[in-house]
Amino acid sequence: MTGEQKKYKFYVEELVKTGGQKGEERIKPTDPQAKAVIDNHKKCAICPTLYTDKPDIFEIHHIDGRSDNTITKNLALICSNCHKQVHTEANRFLKDAKKGDPYPIRPFFHPSISSKTKTNKPNKISKFIPCAYCEGSGKENPFLGTICRVCKGKGKNEINEPAEDCAYCRGTGKENPFLGTICRVCKGKGKNEIHTAAEDCAYCKGTGKENPFLGTTCRVCKGRGYN
């Protein structure tokens, strides 16, 4: 978990502890009380955005959710994008908790951080592996002799490395082994391409499924099991 993810999770957890936001935010970055916070940090408390670059998008966050608690240690300088995500996720978690079905806190996303992760992708190395869907036979149904719709009868598929077994279908290439439906995540290949900075998805705990009983694809990792 990156430093940004840890800070984001901390702010969400603090709001959850106190039951969410109590009243509207009273302090603005231009207020005298915010000066000490800005002088100490000069950037968003979660993402790399600098206050001097985009002062208009910054807001003051009350860590414990109480707008009447304006002491400096309860204030954080956060850009509007991160601020919105913190409150949205805390409210979502509390709402699900009331239903008795609280999912883990979803990972933080920010365009600048996401772009950094993309630069960690190594040069793609292409290779052929046995088709997971037909187990390398090239036939979808050995008894009927139908051609495998994934590998087109070749018995192998091209993938880019590094790759891991698909979390959603557990590397079988089949979403439902009894019905023979092709896995919607790996498209029947049984493997998905990963990158060097990949971590198990916290939302689905690396399973790729949001609800194991319904088989719904994880909305965060899109069924891959990692981010």
Image: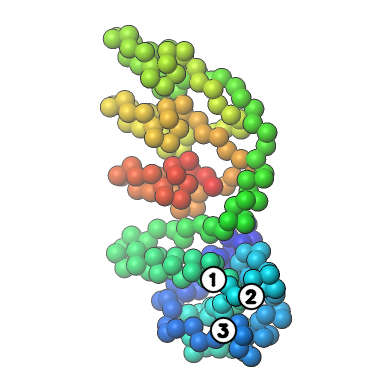
As displayed, is residue 220 above or below residue 16?
above
Q: Crowdedness of circle 2 by 10 Å Cα count: few (<14), some, many (20+)?
A: some
Q: Quadrant of residue 142?
A: top left
Determine which of the numbered discs, if any, sits on residue 114 in the image.
Answer: none
Disc 3/disc 2 C-alpha distance (Å): 11 Å
Q: Report x, y in % for residue 9.
A: 53, 65
Quadrant the N terminus occupies: bottom right
Q: Earlier in the sequence, mark 2 or mark 1?
A: 2
Is the C-beta separation of discs 3 and 2 under 8 Å?
no
Amino acid at dot 1: Ser
Instruction: Report the residue at 31% width, 25% height from top.
Output: 180
Q: Residue at point 52% right, 45% down?
A: 226
Examine the rendered structure and indicate whether residue 143 appears above or below residue 159. above
Q: Secondary structure at mark 1?
A: helix
Q: Position of residue 42 (x, y in %)?
A: 70, 75
Say how many tags the image has. Answer: 3
**Disc with the residue nearer the chain's start (3 vs 2):** 3
Mark 3 — residue? 28
Which residue is denoted by mark 1 in the rendering?
A: 80
Tell us which disc is closer to us: 3 or 2: 2
Instruction: Tell me the kind of residue under disc 3.
Output: Lys
Badge 2 vs badge 1, beta-carbon distance below 8 Å: no
Tell me the element at label 2: helix
**Image position, residue 94 (x, y; %):** 38, 69
Report which residue position mark 2 lands on.
Answer: 55
The answer to whether one can see residue 227 in this image is yes
